[in-house]
Image (cartoon, rainbow, N blue to C red):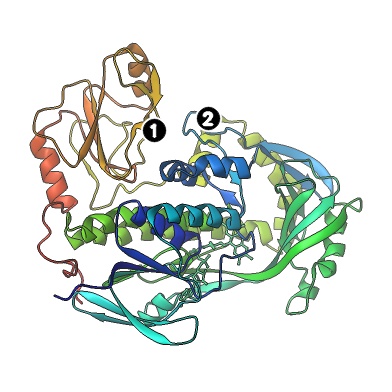
Amino acid sequence: MERVDTDVLIVGAGPTGLMLANQLGRRGVRAQIIDRHAGPARETRALGVQTRTLEIYAQLGIVERALELGRRATGANMWAEGRWAARVPLGDIGRELSPYPFVLILGQDDNERLMGDRLRDWGMAVQWRTELVGLAQEPGQVTATLKDPGGALRRLTAAWVAGCDGARSAVRELSGIGFPGEPYEHVFFVADTRATGSMVPDELNVYLWREGFHLFFPMRGADHWRVVGILPPALRGRDDLTFNDVIPSVRSEAGSGLVFQECTWFSTYRIYHRRAARFRDRRAFLLGDAAHIHSPVGAQGMNTGLQDAYNLAWKLALVTSRRAAPALLDSYEAERIPVAERLLRTTDRAFALIVSDDWLAGLFRTRILARILAFAMERETIRKLAFLTISQTGIRYRASPLSETLAGLPRGAPRAGDRVPWLRLKLEPTGSAEDLFQKLADTRFNLIVIGQSPPPGLGEPLHTLIVPEDPGNDRELAGVGIPKPSFYLLRPDGHIGLAGVRLEVAAVARYLQERVHLGSERGEPGVDTASSAD
Ligand SMILES: Cc1cc2nc3c(=O)[nH]c(=O)nc-3n(C[C@H](O)[C@H](O)[C@H](O)COP(=O)(O)OP(=O)(O)OC[C@H]3O[C@@H](n4cnc5c(N)ncnc54)[C@H](O)[C@@H]3O)c2cc1C
């Protein structure tokens, strides 16, 4: 078979494509990333960086920079019809669950810049002004037709193509994959402003009113606020709008004392909820907005795309380096479609409640919602559930073909498919407790062995951590329901692959061979997958 020009062609250098490029680059995969724009986007667009993303940023080596640039959302102040109603504490609600137990307010442009800069460390750079215009799948490879900056067409062959090319994805359209869903009737506006008013400084301010809401996000710099709201019906359908047209309605709800000094970016956008019918056509994958779009409620969009990329990257790395058979890639869709489905369902419900024009819903929003939220967040279990959902640390793949929980683990113990809990464990008998996440190598499988000695013969590709006998370790493990003895085999992305009580070499070897398809690669980097026909 002829050698392809690149193992992976990444189409689109938004957050999703940049994350995928980084994850492939640091694993030594031959990959190219193209984007039809002339350079990085300047707009902030998405703002909320969730806990799970920060954990991944830590592995990528960019979390410190992100934390320096961003602002931690410590609380949300709820205003009902101009009057302060309640404060929902957001800071540290997941204190015991992650080293980054908060939402970080950091614009999409900053996120893209951090990931774009990091690309250089792997010897990669985005090829700007390069557009994908054609895609043909042949046995063993994909031929992409690219339009270069001067307008010339050229062909590039790749073993795999990753469509990270946004809501109007060319990869999706050229692959004939449907994108069913609907637009919402409301039109959103978003504005980056300098403003003073009743807003509680440095916190999220939510102004609820009968006809809708306005959100004020604190941004970097004095009096810098991102304002998001729904366009008043009278303004819908106009394409010459400026922020000045919207100010009267914002002022009437957020208070007449509101003064806007400057608006650096204003945009309106229609929101859709759509999901691609499949996330894959043979050698082409869909990730991020190319695969799913939904309302911005909960700041999940960008984060979900980043997670799609993190899920696919380690699998592509094993397949392109011929350490695993392409059948491993089947688990991408099996794991990420249910996540997208759940996300669309929950954001749709929340959005309907927030924007409903219904009189009763308006009353609920202004009289009841703020108080319920504040009351609920005082309850530990509700707070934890809210954190797990919004932070994306609760995402799990229990039904995945890559998840196997062996008999004997008690109910309540973490199971295969779950993200491994964050623990502080003493890993050296004479040392002090260390952050487990810092000890995990996310480019390898990690094996955590508890209350037993690892049997000989485990070897590559495992990175083994033995948890010594220690009362502090016992308390930490018991706190998350991990019994002694037990073992947890983690996939590179930190999700549990295999979990059980007594560690046996044969069970681990069988898991890696039969479920991960390690060591069962049978040919060149273009072998067809077992489940899909070229
Ligand atoms: C106005 C606005 C406000 C938003 N606010 C929020 C928010 O507050 N919170 C939130 O979570 N989300 C928000 N979003 C959504 C969020 O921006 C997206 O979820 C996120 O950008 C998805 O990232 P992506 O990389 O998958 O796609 P994109 O960011 O859309 O990137 C796709 C890239 O692919 C490139 N491309 C497209 N076609 C081709 C082609 N044929 N060849 C080469 N390159 C191509 C494009 O140039 C683009 O750079 C907002 C979106 C908009 C428009």
Element type at mark 2: loop
Horizontal side of residue 295 vs 159, given as left or right? right
Q: Is residue 295 left or right of residue 315?
A: right
Seen from the viewer's position, the closer of residues 367 and 96 is 96
Where residue 492 appears, as percent x and y from the top left, is: 30, 45
**Residue at mark 1 to residue at mark 2: CA–CA distance:** 17 Å
Question: Relative to 476, does residue 166 appear above or below in the rendering?
Answer: below
Label 2 sits on what residue type?
Answer: Arg
Mark on residue 266? Answer: none
- Give the quadrant of residue 442: top left
Mark 1–mark 2 CB contact (< 8 Å): no
Q: In the image, 408: left or right of 316?
A: left
- Answer above or below: position of 163 versus 44: below
* Residue at image coords 16%, 69%: 527
- Whether residue 297 appears in this view of the structure is no
Dot 1 or dot 2, earlier in sequence: 2
Circle 1: element type: helix
| Residue displayed at 61% across by 36% down | 376
- Identified at 38% across, 16% down, the residue is 432
What label sits on residue 95 in the rendered view? 2
